[in-house]
Amino acid sequence: MPCCWSPGCGRARSSFRRSPCRGGGAAGAVGLSLPPAELAGALESGQISLSPAPPLRLAVTGPLSPYLSVRDLAWTLIRSGQCSGKAVVIRAPQLTAAQAMDLCGLLGAAGAVTALCVREDFPADETVDLTALQPMAAPPGTPRSFPPEKPTDCG
């Protein structure tokens, strides 16, 4: 059984049943990425050592504009740096399963320990209003390499 990510949780080991994936958070499951050596050890022993990551609870409000994608939300969160090293729990009932999977995968690839989408209400640390988002673009490569927030004057 995976760690519950609750503050003060003392469980440092969990049973390893399947190879976790980043997109698992879209289905309400904790997904992790493991280096090959750690995955091999987990498959051999049947256990994996986890240190609970600090949680970040996000509530996403408002409808997603037809001119935006869920990637604009992900890139906004990544640019802010607030997800790095955290277990991100996202309440966004307005997202489809495909959008939730895309969001969880991008946050995992950009430094979040894991990202998990839930439908239940909970007290949020931060609220993100989808109507306030602007379209964004990320160049090929790492999801963290963005153009500057404000365009530069090329004269």
Image (cartoon, grey):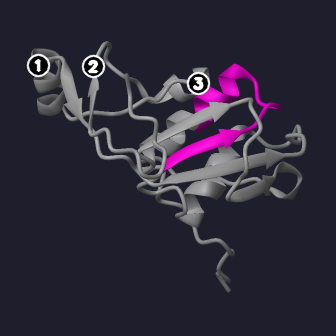
Q: From what the image shows, is residue 66 above or below residue 54? A: above
Secondary structure state at the residue bearing disc 2? loop
Instruction: Judge whether residue 122 is colored magenta.
Output: no
Contact? badges 1 and 2 (CB < 8 Å): yes
Q: CA distance from mark 1 to mark 3?
A: 26 Å
Residue topped by disc 2: 16
In the image, the segment drawn in magenta is 87-103
Contact? badges 1 and 3 (CB < 8 Å): no
Is disc 3 surrounded by few (<14), some (14 to 19) or many (20+) residues within 10 Å?
some
The answer to whether residue 96 is seen in the rendering is yes
Left or right of 34, for residue 59: right
Q: Which mark is residue 7?
A: none
Mark 1 vs mark 3: which is more N-terminal? 3
Mark 1 vs mark 2: which is more N-terminal? 2
- Residue 154, by quadrant, is bottom right
Q: Position of residue 69 (x, y in %)?
A: 74, 39
Residue occupying image coordinates x 45% and y 55%: 54
Residue topped by disc 1: 45
Q: Position of residue 124 (x, y in %)?
A: 71, 53
Secondary structure state at the residue bearing disc 1? helix
Q: Quadrant of the C terminus?
A: bottom right
Q: From what the image shows, is residue 28 above or below residue 89? A: above
Depth check: give the residue in front, 84 or 139: 84
Is disc 1 surrounded by few (<14), some (14 to 19) or many (20+) residues within 10 Å?
few
Specify the farthest residue to the bottom. 155
Q: Position of residue 77 (x, y in %)?
A: 62, 56
Q: Quadrant of the N terminus?
A: top left
- Residue 103, by quadrant, is top right
Left or right of 80, for residue 110: left
